[in-house]
Image (tube, rainbow, N blue to C red):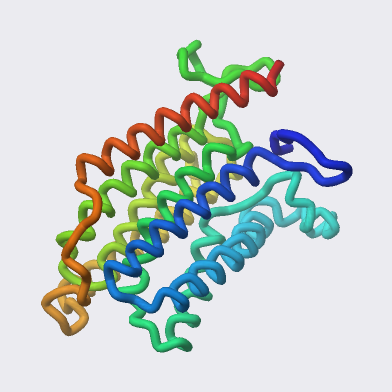
């Protein structure tokens, strides 16, 4: 069950809902700024982002049902709509949200890869912030490490924070790379590969259904995404999709890299304090 911060009548506000909403707002702001820098249509870009978020949530739920707990939901179909019990798969969100985004861009005659590159910095920072409120903890620690979190009398790995840290690092890499990207679409596939790599690492600290030996289903899905992403990135880097430089952007960068690194570092510190503070309060 997710941490319930408070309730108003029969309506409950959960921790994950709050951090996800904050992540979405900040992510949309970053997308808007990148859209302006790349001279993309602001209205179309915001509509695209909102459609992607909405269908991404649906995909996250479907992905969890199909890949992680199909038998349970087959026997308990009413629980499919009980989001308060948790159960979202980021891989499902990427597949469904990405597919919807692709068809929307084609329908609206938007430059697909240029637009995708504008979106991914906002997506990954939104995921980093939203993950702080995730209710899926890691496996028990084999030693009493000081950063462990106590849940139901067990000291667990804070798998959420591991992923938050890795996602912030990926954001910084993408943010810097966007100034030197050699072709449109490069940032998008760096995001796909990088995020799948992050999830592959974090899965070693989580408990999910096993698929092949010590590898979980999430491990296998991440590997598939990494391999496909590397293959497409290699093909695109050779062809450079018929261009030598990425699409037109406004050269001025509003924030220096040092300032951005400082902001992200502060954001991670705040995330850590918030994470442990919330779980200290609600574990008492």
Q: Residue at x 56, y 71 (%)?
A: 51
Residue 122 visible within the image: yes
Residue 200: % across, % down: 42, 45
Where is residue 64, by image quadrant? bottom right
Left or right? Give the position of 139 relative to 35. Answer: right
Left or right? Give the position of 149 relative to 187. Answer: right
Q: Where is 117 relative to 151, above or below?
A: below
Q: Residue furthest left?
A: 244
Q: Nearer the viewer, residue 72 or 6?
A: 6
Q: Count the labels in the image.
A: 0
Q: Residue at x 27, y 67 (%)?
A: 37
Residue 96 visible within the image: no
Q: Where is 33 relative to 219, above or below?
A: below
Q: Where is 188 relative to 18, above or below?
A: below
Left or right? Give the position of 195 relative to 142. Answer: left
Q: Nearer the viewer, residue 119 or 73?
A: 119
Left or right? Give the position of 84 relative to 56. Answer: right
Residue 247: % across, % down: 22, 76
Residue 68: % across, % down: 64, 51
């Amino acid at each position: 069950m997710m941490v319930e911060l408070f309730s108003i009548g029969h309506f409950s506000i959960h921790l994950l809902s709050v951090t996800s909403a904050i992540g979405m707002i900040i992510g949309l702001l970053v997308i808007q700024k990148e859209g302006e820098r790349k001279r993309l249509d602001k209205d179309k870009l915001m509509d695209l982002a909102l459609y992607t978020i909405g269908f991404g949530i649906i995909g996250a739920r479907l992905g969890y049902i199909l890949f992680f707990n199909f038998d349970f939901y087959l026997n308990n179909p009413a629980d499919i709509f009980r989001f308060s019990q948790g159960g979202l798969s980021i891989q499902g969100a990427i597949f469904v949200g990405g597919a919807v985004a692709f068809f929307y861009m084609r329908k609206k005659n938007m430059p697909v890869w240029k637009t995708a590159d504008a979106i991914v910095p906002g997506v990954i920072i939104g995921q980093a912030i939203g993950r702080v409120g995730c209710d899926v903890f890691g496996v028990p620690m084999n030693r009493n490490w000081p950063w462990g979190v106590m849940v139901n009398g067990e000291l667990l790995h804070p798998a959420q924070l591991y992923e938050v840290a890795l996602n912030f690092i990926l954001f910084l890499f993408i943010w810097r790379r966007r100034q030197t990207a050699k072709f449109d679409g490069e940032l998008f596939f760096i995001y796909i590969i990088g995020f799948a790599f992050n999830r592959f690492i974090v899965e070693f600290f989580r408990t999910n259904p096993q698929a092949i030996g010590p590898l979980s289903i999430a491990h296998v899905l991440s590997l598939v995404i990494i391999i496909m992403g590397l293959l497409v990135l290699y093909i695109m880097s050779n062809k450079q999709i018929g261009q030598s430089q990425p699409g037109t952007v406004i050269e001025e960068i509003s924030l220096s890299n040092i300032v951005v690194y400082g902001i992200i570092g502060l954001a991670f510190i705040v995330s850590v304090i918030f994470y442990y503070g919330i779980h200290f309060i609600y574990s008492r």
